[in-house]
Image: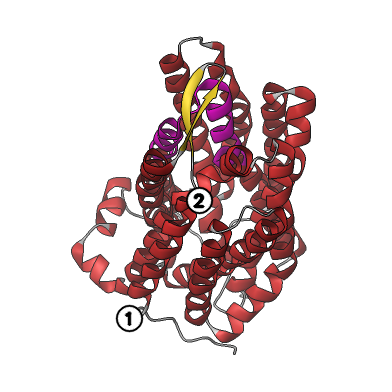
Amino acid sequence: MSQKFSRNTTASLYLIALAGNIAFGVENQYYNVFLYNVIAPSPFYVSLMVAITAVVSTLTAMFMGALSDIKGTRRKFMLYSFIFWAFTTAMFPFAAFFTTVMIAVTTAILFDSIMSFFGATAYDAAYRAYIVDISTLENRGKAIAINEIMTLVAILITYGVSGYIIEAFGYYIFFIIIGIITGILGLIGSKLAKDSPDLKPLEIGYWKHIKSTFRVENIRENKNIFLVLFGIGIWAIAFNVFFPFIIIYLQHYIGLDLLMSSLVIFIALLVSIILGIPIGKLVDRVGRKKFAFYSVFFLSVSLILWSLTTDLILILIFGILWVLGMTTWHIATQTWVNDLFPKDKAGHFQGYYLVFNVLIGMLIGPFIGNLLAELWGTPIIIDGIPGLVPPPQIFFVAAILVLFSVLPLIKAKELPQIRK
């Protein structure tokens, strides 16, 4: 396989990553902000929604990824799922039409879960496997870097313009616009994508394919995958202690308005976008393991510094540093684990990735954040509904927890690099 991607392949990587991460970026922050500001200011409801949709996404990635392995195509799964992903993204704010808080919260979680099913099918199951299919040890770091850069660009766009759109037109128009953008970019990217010629339908039954992946022997044979995944899981727990509450923290603890809160993250992301491709190339040349270790310690120090200040300039500087640490970690570990995935189970193994990166992280992390809010959070009342403001302790605790993610990585091995 050529070290260089074709123009259409490169364009598909950029467009699909951008479309998917615009939708997920809005879900990961502005679904939470909408639930908190419009329906009920409770960190617990935010944590519950994050946890439930993480389960949905993980199971979807695992089972739909396996189906894409069996059918021998990623492209069709991306095409059809993006259509429904666009519609379900726009559905979310209509949960607030219910005046009873519990019904509105339940409906919001239901709408988010439906969106997560189609999003996980298109992006986590099909697109992530597509990256494995079309790349090699020599260029996978670059492919992951493209994906990570577009993740940051997507978040940059959502943080950069979301505050303006919400203030000018309200949440309902905002989510409809995001749905339209997701659908258009995703469909164009999926049209440009071509399945790898090496990807063929498997001559095995669906359930047999799934069961074979869960055999103890199979897990032993792929122990390095699971060592890296354990590290990813610990990192994800630490990250989700604070990340679902970032905008809420900046808005209600630091005292910034929604627009300024978004701009702080916007600027931090811009720096990581500029450095993303160079980091990806270095990961290909120097190695995945070294960069994973560096990023953990870099992120930990940055979060501690972030937790200790309320000064806007320092918040911006330390925000740039922890976002850069996050970017380096994602590029290094995603490249590493994708190197190790079995080619004939690349789709199904994306489900394993989500078990650790999404399910475990989002099931445990946000509830630790909620517990810290219960212990040290500031009481708040929004539209007559009492709640709590997440405290700076969520960043300090996350900074300590993230250090443990290096422990499983110590024994994990990389595949030998073809090109140093």
> Could you tell me if residue 5 is visible in this image?
yes
Q: Position of residue 92 (x, y in %)?
A: 57, 25
Q: Which residues are magenta?
A: 26-53
Instruction: Say whether residue 194 is left or right of residue 234.
Output: right
In the rendered image, the quadrant that contains the N terminus is bottom right
Query: Looking at the image, how many numbered discs can be counted on the residues?
Result: 2
Q: Position of residue 123 (x, y in %)?
A: 55, 48
Q: Position of residue 99 (x, y in %)?
A: 51, 9
Note whether 311 is above or below 295 in the view shown.
above
Q: How is the image coloured?
A: secondary structure
Cα distance between the residues tagged 2 and 1: 33 Å
Mark linked to residue 392: 2
Furthest toward the left, the residue is: 216
Is residue 169 one of those drawn in magenta?
no
Q: Which circle's residue, 2 or 1, is located before the other in the chain?
A: 2
How crowded pointer 1 is (Cα within 10 Å; few <14, some 14-19, many 20+) is rated as few
